[in-house]
Image (spheres, helix red, strand yellow):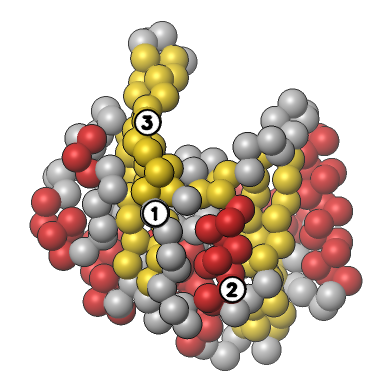
Amino acid sequence: MEKAYFNWSSGKDSALALYYVMQGKQFKVDSLFSVIASGKDKIAMHEIGMELLMKQATQIGIPLTVFRFNESWSDEEYGMAMERYIEKFKSQGITTALFGDIYLEEIRSRRISNCAKSGIKAEFPLWNISSQEILKRFVETGFKAIITCIDHSVLPESFLGKVIDREFIETYPQGADICGENGEYHSFVFDGPLFKKPVDFQIVRKYHVDYKDVDTNRPHRYCYLELG
């Protein structure tokens, strides 16, 4: 089996992709790998902090490696720091980086290119499976996830805090990607066949942040659910 690390976002696509990998015989996942901005200690957009990431990793039974970056870094500085982490993985015999992306070709190509520069492969267990099929499999496999972020221009605030289940699928707005691949929403997985036990968490608060749209200069609102 090839040794790999898995790029872990804490959300549903990561969970299903990792589950498929662990059911197969091609890869042995030695580490979950999460990227967090220094000083925030949360995964961007998902808004999941270190404590919950560690709880997930503990219940999955795979060690967590966290790459902290400074938001003031240039692209070159970020790339150099990331390469140092990749070199550590390579020194452990890891040859492959695993991702939960579904169909955004630009992102996939960039990941493949960046990995190739570091001398490792990039693999995508969910690639080109339809969004509808992925969410159907996620629910039918027994996973549970809660919505922690929504793009308010696409989804009503009532979706914040919903659990992904059959009702979620049935009530999801037509025209929006049901897996949130275009940033419609983000999630936190707390139960399912990957976990020895469900991950304990509580809802701390709801809040929103308005960003300036670069094209229209109008506020663009994201609503968040803070978990603890």
Q: Is residue 139 left or right of residue 99?
A: left
Secondary structure category for the residue under label 1? loop
Dot 1, crowdedness within 10 Å: few (<14), some or many (≥20)?
A: few
Q: Are marks 1 and 3 in contact (CB under 8 Å)?
A: no
Front in this rendered view, residue 81 or 133:
81
Sequence order check, earlier mark of 1 and 3: 1
Of the residues shown, which amino acid type is indicated by label 2? Answer: Thr
Secondary structure category for the residue under label 2? helix
Residue tagged 3:
207
Residue at image position (24%, 76%) is 140
Would you identify the image quadrant in which residue 28 lies? bottom right
Of the residues shown, which amino acid type is indicated by label 1? Answer: Gln
Of the residues shown, which amino acid type is indicated by label 3? Answer: Tyr
Residue 58 is marked as: 2
Q: Is residue 8 left or right of residue 215?
A: right
The image quadrant where one finds the N terminus is bottom right
How many marks the image carries: the answer is 3
Work out how far the residue at label 1 is from the one at label 3, CA to CA, in angstroms.
Answer: 15 Å
Relative to residue 69, is residue 114 depicted above or below?
below
| Front tag of 1 and 2 | 1
